[in-house]
């Protein structure tokens, strides 16, 4: 059962910006690491970025570093992806996913157990 | 870390055993997950920590491997298993998915 909902996608010109949002009416997002994953048309999955529970740690794919910013607002129970300097190859469905994490013998494992339905971003003139 | 998968696609029949291989460009211990995605659908977690079956996933799915070489095995393939399967390394940043293996009906 999908418990995450993305929004904010749309058509934007190259060089433009968009801000994606992800929220949940059932999950308290601030309890988890959260991740953005994207999928270009007809292509595979690409990990984009993640953020820790309190928003103090972020990681990015090389292809978006310096252009995208992941953030969260616990009061709004929301996750965001600010996308600037958009390029045609950023065209994709963007999914947010909860990382439940699994810890064993001091090793942390990603467990993306809950995904939204995705929001479509199209970068085109 | 680069991830490769083989084969890129395969055809199989209901009841078959299917084995998908994922290889990492460097050792990632057992920090690997497997995800299933059906056409038009959302990715679904199958396996994490290389071999731990996610709750609710049928036991015909299993994962193994450590270091650089991993396998996803589907025993007694069912009609609902026809999908694309992706591995994902979570040993280092940036996380990287494999290119996917499409399992089609023979």
Image (cartoon, coloured by chain):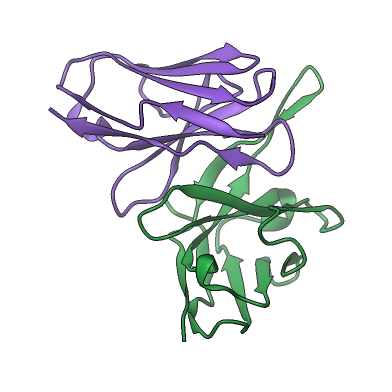
Chain colours: A green, B purple
Q: Quadrant of residue A82?
A: bottom right
Which residue is rendered at x = 58% and y = 66% of the image? Answer: A22
Which residue is rendered at x = 49% and y = 48% of the image? Answer: A45
Across and down, in percent, residue A30 comes to 73, 56
Front residue of B34/A16: it is A16
In the rendered image, the vertical position of residue A49 relative to residue B71, given as above or below = below
Q: How many marks?
A: 0
Left or right of A101, for residue A45:
left
In the rendered image, the vertical position of residue B30 relative to residue A47, given as above or below = above
Left or right of B66, for residue B77:
left
Which residue is rendered at x = 54% and y = 67% of the image? Answer: A90
Left or right of B66, for residue A94:
left
Toward the right, the furthest residue is A56
Front residue of A51/A28: it is A51
Left or right of B51, for residue A76:
right
Across and down, in percent, residue B104 comes to 21, 33
Across and down, in percent, residue B5 comes to 45, 28
Q: Quadrant of residue B84?
A: top left
Across and down, in percent, residue A96 comes to 56, 57
């Amino acid at each position: 059962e999908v418990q995450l909902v993305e929004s904010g996608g749309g058509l934007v010109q190259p060089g433009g910006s968009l801000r994606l949002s992800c929220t949940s009416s059932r999950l308290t997002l601030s309890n988890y690491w959260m991740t953005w994953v994207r999928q270009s048309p007809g292509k595979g999955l690409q990990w984009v970025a993640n953020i820790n529970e309190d928003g103090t740690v972020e990681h990015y794919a090389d292809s978006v570093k310096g252009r995208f910013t992941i953030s969260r607002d616990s009061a709004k129970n929301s996750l965001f992806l600010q996308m600037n300097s958009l390029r045609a190859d950023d065209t994709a469905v963007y999914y947010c996913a909860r990382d439940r994490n699994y810890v064993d013998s001091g090793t942390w494992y990603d467990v993306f157990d809950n995904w939204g339905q995705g929001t479509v971003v199209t970068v085109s003139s | 870390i680069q991830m490769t998968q083989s084969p890129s696609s395969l055809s199989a029949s209901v009841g078959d055993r299917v084995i998908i291989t994922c290889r990492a460009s460097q050792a990632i211990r057992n920090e690997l997950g497997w995800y299933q995605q059906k056409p038009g659908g959302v990715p679904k977690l199958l396996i994490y920590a290389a071999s731990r079956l996610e709750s609710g996933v049928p036991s015909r799915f299993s994962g193994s491997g450590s270091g650089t070489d991993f396998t996803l095995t589907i025993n007694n393939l069912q009609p609902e298993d026809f999908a694309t399967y992706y591995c994902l390394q979570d040993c280092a940043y940036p996380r990287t998915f494999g290119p996917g293996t499409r399992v089609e009906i023979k």
